[in-house]
Amino acid sequence: MAGDNYPNDERRNYYRLEDRVYLEFRRAGEEEVSRYLRQRDEGPQPVSGASQQLDYLSRQMTPLIASIRAESPAIAQYLEHLDRKVDIVAGMVFFDRFNEEMGRHALQTSNTLDISEGGISFLATEPLTVGSHLFCRLIIAGPQMGLETFGKVVHCEAVEGGDHRIGVGFPYINDYQRKLLSRYIFDRQREQLRQRQESTG
């Protein structure tokens, strides 16, 4: 499928954070994912979701800020701070919307076992076929952040108790969502390190 450029070597390079994040998911068909990718590649449409429009604007801003940094690092840093404030507000808006929609759709629920920019793993009562697609919605309570994307099942193994540990890669996540996820993982990693230092100090 177009856009499915997600080699195993790249997936292993992501830092995996052991963290429990609320997850809603459902099976998704090839045509649904292909339609999403076509719309993403064509750029934001008048009826596009906020996430797609923010992703487009973020990609447009990146080279501009790099150019400004060469002449005025202070202005570039100021713009980056503004950009982060927008990200925080947008994440909270998505979080609120997802909270309102919880339980209204035919989505299965779970909690992640670990999470990275490249994907997640979680427990499910039923096995999922490796290579199949899922629509995933993550709701992260701490920073009040929500995001949704399509994922691809990369492994499924039976575990004790009759459940299945499912690994899902995020080959289709857009740059804007990856940036939000990266910041969350970095902040949680730093927080966990601080907690470990305090407990041993």
Image: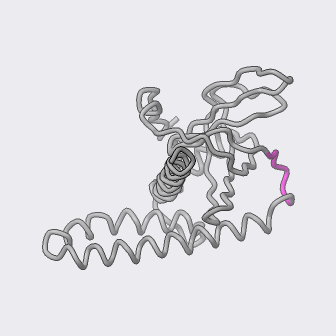
Look at 44% across and 64% down and name the residue there.
Answer: 56
Q: Does the segment drawn in magenta span residue 107?
A: yes
- Which quadrant holds residue 104? bottom right
Look at 47% across and 75% down and name the residue there.
Answer: 85
* Residue 99 image position (x, y, % from top left): 76, 65
Q: Quick check: can you spot residue 135?
A: yes
Look at 72% across and 28% down and name the residue there.
Answer: 165
**Rendered position, 111 above or below 40:** above
Look at 27% across and 70% down and name the residue there.
Answer: 65
Q: Main secondary structure of the magenta part?
A: loop
* Residue 186 image position (x, y, % from top left): 47, 52
Q: Is residue 68 left or right of residue 115?
A: left
**Rendered position, 16 above or below 176:** above
| Nearer to us in this view, 93 or 192 | 192
| Nearer to us in this view, 38 or 101 | 101
**Rendered position, 141 above or below 198:** below
Q: Which residues are magenta?
A: 104-109
Counting the numbered discs, the total is 0
Q: Is residue 149 left or right of residue 72?
A: right
Q: Does the segment drawn in magenta span residue 34?
A: no
* Residue 80 image position (x, y, % from top left): 35, 71
Q: Is residue 165 left or right of residue 104?
A: left
Q: Quick check: can you spot residue 38?
A: no
